Image: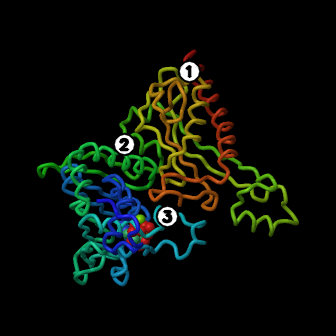
Amino acid sequence: PPAAPGRSIRPIDRSSLHRLTAAQVIVSLESAVKELVENALDAGATSIQVVFRDHGAVGFSVADNGHGIPKEDLPALGQKHHTSKIRSFSDLGQVSTYGFRGEALNSLCAIADVSIVTATKEPLGFELQLSSTSTLDAPPKPAARARGTTISVTNLFRSLPVRQQEFKRNARREYAKALATVQNYAVVSTGVRLSVVNIVNSRPTPMLTTKGNAHLRDNLADVFGAKAAIDVFDVDVSLKIPPPARGTAFTPISDALEQHQLSDSNDDTAGAYTIRVVGVMSHPRPSAGRSSSDTRQMYINGRPCESPKLAKAVAEEWRAAGGAGAGGGEGSGSGTGGLPQCFLDLKCPTDTYDVNVTPDKRTIFLHRENEIIEELRVALRLLLERQNTHYTTSQVL
Ligand code: ADP
Ligand code: MG
């Protein structure tokens, strides 16, 4: 029954609160997998294996060859807001890791069974289980393992019966979403061998394998097939973001400092910075670039993100240059007409954006979004024009 009016205000009991807040960080199989893959990348792994059991309905694990977790850190592992990545809010401007809130493991423990094997150097590692309150119920046991970490998750949404039922009923669909997300990381993570296997009735099916390629385009071929990489051209441009007009509302702190330090000399360029945009885009041809929603992704420093404004600008330039692939009208803020297949990573200075907007960190606040979009449009226009010249010439020959 609804709370009677006039009931006194009291704190929610601790374990209920834990479950409530955890359910906002780990909202799906996809977000659970994403958090663990990000942790593996943050640990500097060059090899990552994701294994689903029965499409994740039974569980999944992520194994990496990253730096591992030192024994003395194990008791703090999974404690709420415990992280090795930042110490204070002011570190946020410098953070280059995917994680920094120290919430993922803590949240996972509240809603699933989590076990970990980790080693900072082979052959001796430690094995431990985290309880639902993320304490170690038993001391870590020695276990043989090469350097790296394996985190296994079973019984997802154990403590949220309604969501667990819903999850099991839609296991295939949830799995497809999780796989699509791993694909996005696999495409952008150059230098990393990433694989996904789905084990059903003890039969493993390989779903994805990248070979540690140096170029995003080769990752694309590994993930979506060789054909996907033929239809695209490489993008590698530098955007010069001009200094902010005086009196703009948002100036990154470091800009302000720099301005202060350089005030005698370089007054015009203070606060200016460069963004390198690396990736691929489908040729601007009427028929090329058939694209579905899973072959488009924008990234900021390798972090998949949603920016309808950026995506719209990219699509408009592509269409203006003659592109007209399928996939329009999907309501992705891209207007009518086709959308290019494209994967673009904006390599920005870490203090020029804020990822701490939503718990999943997919919504990113770019300080100078309008200027960035303007510069990106100009750069893409030039590139697309060149593609067209190329195309026409080879047609004539
Ligand atoms: P965050 O990533 O925000 O720090 P997490 O809850 O995801 O928070 O992880 C907590 C801490 O556990 C990390 O800061 C890191 O020190 C350690 N950790 C988690 N996963 C791994 C991993 N795969 N390899 C090495 N360390 C890890
Ligand atoms: Mg993390």
Which structural element holds mark 1? helix
Q: Above or below — where is 1 with respect to 382?
A: below
Quarter occupied by residue 130: bottom left
Any part of residue 67 in sight? no
Any part of residue 359 in sight? yes
Numbered disc in front, either 1 or 2: 2
Quarter occupied by residue 39: bottom left
Q: Above or below — where is 143 with respect to 21?
A: below
Say which label, 2 or 3, has the lower sequence index. 3
User: Where residue 237 sits: x, y (%)?
Assistant: 63, 44
Disc 2 from disc 3: Cα separation? 24 Å
Which structural element holds mark 2? helix
Residue drawn at the location 29% of the way across and 51% of the way down: 196
Looking at numbered disc 1 in the image, what kind of residue is underneath it?
Ser
Q: Which residue is mark 3?
A: 97
User: Where residue 79 sits: x, y (%)?
Assistant: 37, 76
Which quadrant holds the N terminus?
Answer: bottom left
Q: Is mark 1 within 8 Å of ligand 2?
A: no
User: Where residue 329 sits: x, y (%)?
Assistant: 48, 27
Say which label, 1 or 3, has the lower sequence index. 3
Residue furthest right in the image:
264
Looking at numbered disc 3 in the image, what kind of residue is underneath it?
Thr
Q: Nearer the viewer, residue 285 or 97?
A: 97
Q: Where's ligand 2: which quadrant?
A: bottom left
Task: Specify the label residue 223 is tagged with.
Answer: 2
Q: Is mark 3 within 8 Å of ligand 1?
A: yes
Numbered disc in front, either 2 or 3: 3
Left or right, 305 with respect to 212, comes to: right
Q: Which residue is mark 1?
A: 394
Disc 1 from disc 2: Cα separation? 29 Å
Task: Specify the label residue 153 is tagged with.
Answer: none
Numbered disc in front, either 1 or 3: 3
